Image (cartoon, rainbow, N blue to C red):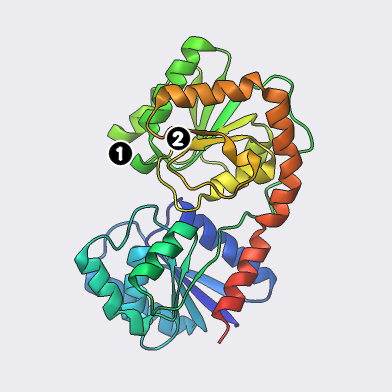
Amino acid sequence: MRKIAQILLSPRVGGAETLAATLEQEWGAKGVVSQTFYLDPDGVHTGRLRRVTNLRKALTRFDPDAVVAHSYLPSLYARIAWGGRGSVHSVLHSASDDFASFQSRLTERLLSSRTASVIAVSASQETLYRHRFPKVRLTRIANGVSREIASRQRFSSNPLRIVTVARVAIQKRPEFWNAVTHRMYAESPDIQFEWWGPLSGQPSIDQAVLSASPSARHMGTTSNLSEVLQSADLMFHPSGREAHSIVLLEGAVAGVPVVYADSIDSPEDDEVWNLRYSSSDVDDAVRKINQVIQDWETIAARAVTFSAEAKLRYSMDSTANQYLEWMRP
């Protein structure tokens, strides 16, 4: 395996984009050339026919040994453009059901002959896809964490800084975050909330993080996530839907206690993953954050102790190797 093309919808920040960038970095360290191609390079819909023709031309020039298409639309177009000429591996990222409609299921069946394999990032995705398309070659490869995320050795004595790391989007529930920050400010005004990640560009969505409580701020993007996590006390994840969240794993590797919704699959059964709140209940989210603060030394020490194990278990090096082994001819 010398050259791998990765296909994404557009240049933006998200779980699929983070995985693709980190895979490219890891594969590069192993001597494998990886290049990312976008259906919509400028972030604007280029049209169905142009997507196919542009992608086919780009892949013809690059001549990859394998194509890894991340998420539903990139996978759809990659198989149409290249599935008859080379191996295309489709990666399922969505927390929602990509194949809920009859039309999407029919299309997937029609494209099965152009599908080298399907890779699920979560157990629930794997189970559902296997049930619907039992003849397609399928595996599960969990997301991994970049080696750049450092594991902390100690924790602060007084937890005051709570971070959220996500692009601002409806799926990430900025309004839920807004409500939690206001409730926490009324009870504990010294607690600081920070949202790290790009705005959506839609005022109706962005307003929730730009007009949160006096103790909450939108921090913009960061080029050093490890530094952000090292200076944080707690990670609060407001999203209600995730397939296999990389940011939760990054928090665990950094040694930060992670509070997240019970509508998101727990990465594993370790005790550090028990800090879950009822998905749509602001009061319960506040209670869970307060529980962490009240039992701080025990919970923080557990997170720090687990971080070394998490760094090994969720290694992106391991994830990258699994992809290479699975795609080997």
State the image quarter where residue 117 is shown.
bottom left
Towards the viewer: 102 or 328: 102
Task: Please give the name of the residue rendered at 36% of the width and 29% of the height, measured from the top-left corner.
Answer: 175
Which residue has dot 1 on it? 202
Confirm or deny contact between disc 1 and disc 2 (CB under 8 A): no
Q: Quadrant of the N terminus?
A: bottom right
Label 1 vs label 2, nearer the camera: 2
In this view, the residue farthest toward the right is 153
> Which part of the image, by quadrant, shows the C terminus?
bottom right
x and y percentages locating residue 81 in the rendered image:
33, 80
| Rendered residue at 53%/76% (across/down) | 4
Q: Is residue 298 left or right of residue 264?
A: right
75 or 300: nearer the viewer: 300
What amino acid is found at the position of numbered circle 1 in the picture?
Answer: Gln
| The disc label shown at residue 238, or none | 2
* Image location of residue 327, percent across then percent down: 54, 79
**Front in this rendered view, residue 258 or 26:** 258
Q: How many marks?
A: 2
Q: Is 157 placed above or below 266 here?
A: above
Give the secondary structure at mark 1. Answer: loop
